[in-house]
Image: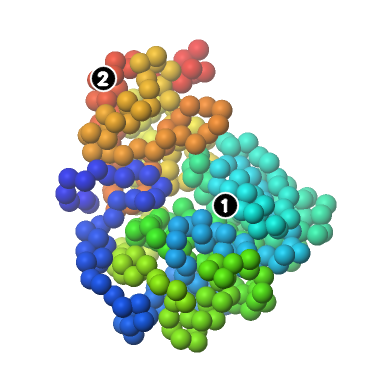
Amino acid sequence: MILGNDPILLTPGPLTTSLATRQAMLRDWGSWDTAFNTMTASICADVVDVVQGAGSHVCVPLQGSGTFSVEAALGTLVPRTGKVLVPVNGAYCQRIVRILGYLGRACTTIDVPEDRFPAPQQVEDALLRDPSITHVAQVHCETGTGILNPLQEIAQVAARHGKGLIIDAMSSFGAIAIDVRTTPFDALIAASGKCLEGVPGMGVVVIRKAALEGAQGNSHSLAMDLYDQHAYMQKTGQWRFTPPTHVVAALRAAIDQFIAEGGQPARGARYAANCRTLIEGMEQLGFKVFLDRKLQAPIIVTFHAPADPNYAFADFYQRVRAKGYILYPGKLTQLETFRVGCIGAIDPNEMRNVVSAVARTLAEMGIRQVAPLAQAA
């Protein structure tokens, strides 16, 4: 699907974008111009439609990386007297806990091993034990491992207890189905440079109208106050502060392609095919996937590092990169791993090509023991 000589980014974002998306950034836009403001409004409407939220939810865009929007959503929607339950099974869940510490918001955690997901019953039990909890913050796809957490079931538990749910859907939005009618939430956070296949630089937060209306005065920060951002945009049609105009234009082009492809079902099917092709090819080479298949999201795959003494990730990475593919280092604390992303403007043919590149790299490095230590033993 990609033309040109640039390496393919097999990461969870930034990711490889289409030529049409990149070309959309060749025009300069005035941030107060009517055409630009109309473009922003159209993006917000389309983002809400992805989760079937028209009428009940609004989209508030924000400059910066996805983490900026996670912090903004937590700071805006959780009152300073609130308390957040965070199921933790990876690095991005841990980041939410760290953000809450900076914000001075109370939190409690459910700690789960990185190769498992939090059970809805654990969330139920935690809410029953501690009625002071006001919100649940759940990462949908934990890209530290590639695990897909049971969002719909956890959302239903939170709703049954009257708790606000804040979803970090950074790596799942646009690829994995989320519907407000079956997965009720107060806020869902996504970003331009993930499964919508735009470029990095802005987040989008889909917020339940009633939750946003009650959030005035909660935020710790003017720049990250989503209530104020939305109110200003409703009044003027403009961003409060200088927007990332080229990123917005690229996202508009990317969403146009997303819709033309068939929306979330088609995008998810392509990524799932990418993931299957990758895993099957890597397993034929002897690699072992970290997660059980039933836990694996079609976003990014964690592989155990080879047990061979000739293996070193830095060398492995550079050799694969020279063949046109940029991999991602592992993010586990106890095991040596590396990750390969399945998202972006790529198809299964690219996944077969990367498997071939890895096979050639193994031969060049003299790696014969591809399985990890435990399996080799």
Which picture quadrant has residue 254? bottom left
Rendered residue at 44%/65% (across/down): 63
Up/down of 345 relative to 217, above or below: above
Report the residue that reaches farthest toward the left.
Answer: 4
Rendered residue at 58%/64% (across/down): 73
Rendered residue at 72%/53% (across/down): 107
Q: Can residue 297 be seen in this view?
A: yes
Image label count: 2
Q: Mark 2 points at which residue?
A: 363
Report the residue that reaches farthest toward the bottom.
Answer: 235
Q: Tell which circle, 1 or 2, labels the residue nearer the N-terminal end.
A: 1
Q: Nearer the viewer, residue 98 or 357?
A: 98
Q: Mark 1 points at which residue?
A: 139
Q: Nearer the viewer, residue 18 or 98?
A: 98
Element at label 2: helix
Horizontal side of 188 relative to 36 (left or right) equals right
Amino acid type at circle 1 is: Val
- Give x and y (percent) for residue 62: 47, 67
- Give x and y (percent) for residue 205: 52, 67
Q: How is the image coloured?
A: rainbow
Horizontal side of 280 relative to 118 (left or right) equals left
- Give x and y (percent) for residue 253: 29, 68
Task: Using the numbered discs, state the Cα–Cα distance from disc 1 to disc 2 in whole angstroms.
Answer: 38 Å
Rendered residue at 39%/50% (across/down): 13
